[in-house]
Amino acid sequence: MNEDIKQSLKLFIVLSRAHKAISEKTNQFFQANGLNPTEFAVLELLYHKGKQPLQKIGGKILLASGSITYVIDKLEKRGYLSRVNCPTDRRVTYAEITADGEALMASLFPEHEQHLHELTNSLSSDEKEEAIELLKKLGLSIKDLSY
């Protein structure tokens, strides 16, 4: 096998393992706080971006739209968000974070940020910046490929 191909395979494996390690730790944090990663992602979106059309949430947090309804239902039952009809278009329903959801995220999000900082603290600030730029470059280049 050609060395470039071996290196590409190694990059994939290292990237996958790093993602898995970070995901496992963040998922433990979410679970310890009574949420799953998707529920946290929906609440985080609403917390930072305000009410969102239900139809757009899946695309913004990278989740299939069929799963969104289930997650929205669960969060609504727990009182963290509510559905709001669009006053100008009956086909559109928004998800909006409630006061309870705001309070939860105001408490959890700073902890989540600190946790991520600790998980990535083995890299210097310059190394983090370099990793961000390199991974952005990789992701954007893949978007244009077709098979």
Image: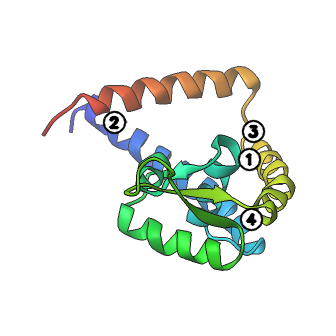
Quadrant of the rendering where the C terminus is positioned? top left
Badge number at residue 116: 1
Residue at 64 percent of width and 22 percent of height:
129
Find numbered disc 2 in the image and state the secondary structure of the residue it sits on.
Answer: helix
Q: Which residue is mark 4?
A: 29
Which of these two is toward me, 10 or 78? 78
Label 2 Cα crowd, 10 Å radius (few <14 / some 14-19 / many 20+): few
Which of these two is toward me, 14 or 21? 21
- Label 2 and label 4: CA atoms lie apart by 32 Å
Of marks 3 and 4, which one's residue comes earlier in the chain?
4
Report how many numbered discs are placed on residues in the image.
Answer: 4
Of marks 1 and 4, which one's residue comes earlier in the chain?
4
Q: Please name the amino acid that badge 1 sits on.
A: Leu
Q: Please name the amino acid that badge 2 sits on.
A: Ser
- Label 3 and label 1: CA atoms lie apart by 11 Å
- Label 3 and label 4: CA atoms lie apart by 19 Å
Q: Which residue is mark 3?
A: 122
**Where residue 48 sits: x, y (%)?**
69, 43
Tags 2 and 1 touching, CB below 8 Å: no
Label 1 Cα crowd, 10 Å radius (few <14 / some 14-19 / many 20+): some
**Where residue 72 sits: x, y (%)?**
54, 69
Tags 3 and 4 touching, CB below 8 Å: no
Q: Please name the amino acid that badge 4 sits on.
A: Phe
Q: Is residue 84 above or below residue 116?
A: below
- Label 1 and label 4: CA atoms lie apart by 10 Å
Find numbered disc 1 in the image and state the secondary structure of the residue it sits on.
Answer: helix
**Where residue 16 sits: x, y (%)?**
46, 51
Label 3 Cα crowd, 10 Å radius (few <14 / some 14-19 / many 20+): few
Find numbered disc 3 in the image and state the secondary structure of the residue it sits on.
Answer: loop
Badge number at residue 8: 2
Q: Please name the amino acid that badge 3 sits on.
A: Ser
- Label 2 and label 1: CA atoms lie apart by 27 Å
